Image (spheres, helix red, strand yellow):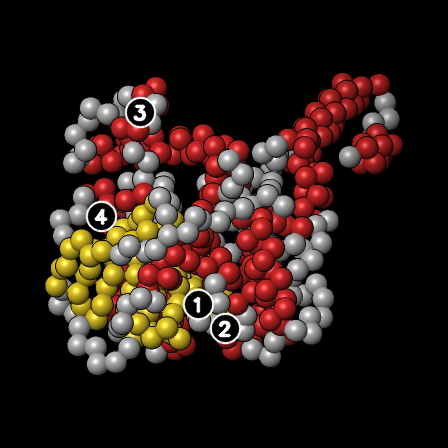
Amino acid sequence: MAEWNCIFKRTWITGSRWKGLKMLWIWTCSFVSIFLGCEGLRAQSVDPADVGQFYPWLQEQANNQPMSLSYLASDWVDREEWRNTGRAKMHELLAYESSAGGLNAEVLEVTAKEDYTRYHVRYSVTANRATEAFLLIPNGLKEKAPAVIAIHDHGGFYYFGKEKITETEDPHGILQEFKEQYYGGRSYADELARRGFVVLVPDGFYFGSQRVDIDKVDERYAKEIRDMDTSTDSYIRQFNRFASSHETLMAKTIFTSGSTWPGILFQGDRASVDYLLTRPEVDTDRIGCIGLSIGGFRSAHLAGLDPRIRAAVVAGWMTTYGSLLKHHLRSHTWMIYVPGQLKYLDLPDVVSLNAPRPLMVINCLQDRLFTLEGMQAAEAKLESVYEKMNAADRFLCRYYDAPHSLNVKMQNDAIDWLSRWLQ
């Protein structure tokens, strides 16, 4: 702009009669320069980090983590040694070992469906805590069948767990709306059963049958809903708001106790595998897992940490942790944090502990919970691991032009993947 200003003055502004025009030009140029300067400053600040000036050095901290137990970090001669080392380190960081106790399994209700039978079951996940689950068993089985643990999402919907991905009679309107938004209106657990899988759908810690008991919480936090009719949609909405706001205090309590929230969740998922193996209908050499969102996060860790899982689908939760730091952690739950993990393993490294067993990753291009770069970096790392193991055909990553969800198309592709490797 300064250069053009000088040229204009030399060639046009030569006499006093042009003094007024000259001043107008200078003012115009000055205004434009100031405007462009302001726009430049604005452009630098259109994407500020959630933690302000602390972001750059925290991002540098993440970028400098060695991830020393990644399969790509060294030439591991003994894969089993690598797996065992990685799993042992994760268990150490997760900091949760349950007290010993049997499953004490019981059947609460049996419901005959057209193609399968639904069992409402309860079993212990620790000596002092139990969960409930739906067990779907295809009709007419003549031999042991492959099985899948279907893991429900988070979605800010705590009142229900297993019901979010399983058909139930007379479901609440709010539950139906949720299924329409995230699952295209279909309960994919039942579709798996129709396709010949034994399916176990457990309630995760803090959801469904394991949701926080309002009557046992300090009244200052729950007084607004204690007298509400618990059978209404409005109560469920209010409960979900309460449970969401209470997550922070719950997380503080868990961390201060010396444990982690993911450690509690993952232990419960492994206990669900324990229960599934007690069922005579199940082929113990053909067990898979699948989940969306926090269910995908749990599916990734169940596959990575439990060698009994033979194939997995991770939907809506496969990224690098470093890519979340700038302004994506705001949308995530306290249930994902494992202090110190990045020093050893990123998320794709964890699920790769099960490689070269089959893994499908489902990503959504309109998913606001992650950056595209983070999803692509995780894909690239997993692809490299499977290629290094000469098993490229056992890893599949697909992108769908949709928001955070597991719609019917994605479900069908996921079921085809599990059928290919387990049936």
- Nearest the camera: 107 or 181? 107
Q: Examine the image and state in which quarter residue 60 appears.
A: top right
Q: Amino acid at mark 4?
A: Gln
Mark closer to the observer (4, 1): 1
Could you tell me if the residues under marks 4 and 1 are in contact, i.e. CB atoms within 8 Å?
no
The residue under label 2 is: 357
Q: Amino acid at mark 3?
A: Ala
Could you tell me if the residues under marks 1 and 3 are in contact, i.e. CB atoms within 8 Å?
no
Q: How many neighbours does mark 4 have within 10 angstroms: few (below 14), some (14-19), or many (20 or more)? A: some
Q: Amino acid at mark 2?
A: Arg
Height in image: 139 above or below 230? below
- Image coordinates of residue 79 in percent, x first then y, are 62, 72
Label 3 and label 2: CA atoms lie apart by 46 Å
- Image coordinates of residue 220 in percent, x first then y, are 34, 19
The residue under label 1 is: 309
Disc on res. 222? 3
Q: How many neighbours does mark 1 have within 10 angstroms: few (below 14), some (14-19), or many (20 or more)? A: many
Q: Amino acid at mark 1?
A: Ile
Label 4 and label 2: CA atoms lie apart by 35 Å
- Disc 2 is placed on an element classified as loop
Question: Mark 2 or mark 1: which comes first in sequence?
Answer: 1
Label 4 and label 3: CA atoms lie apart by 26 Å
Query: Split into 4 quadrants, where in the image is the N terminus?
Result: top right
> Residue at 70% of width from left, 63% of height from top?
73
The residue under label 4 is: 176
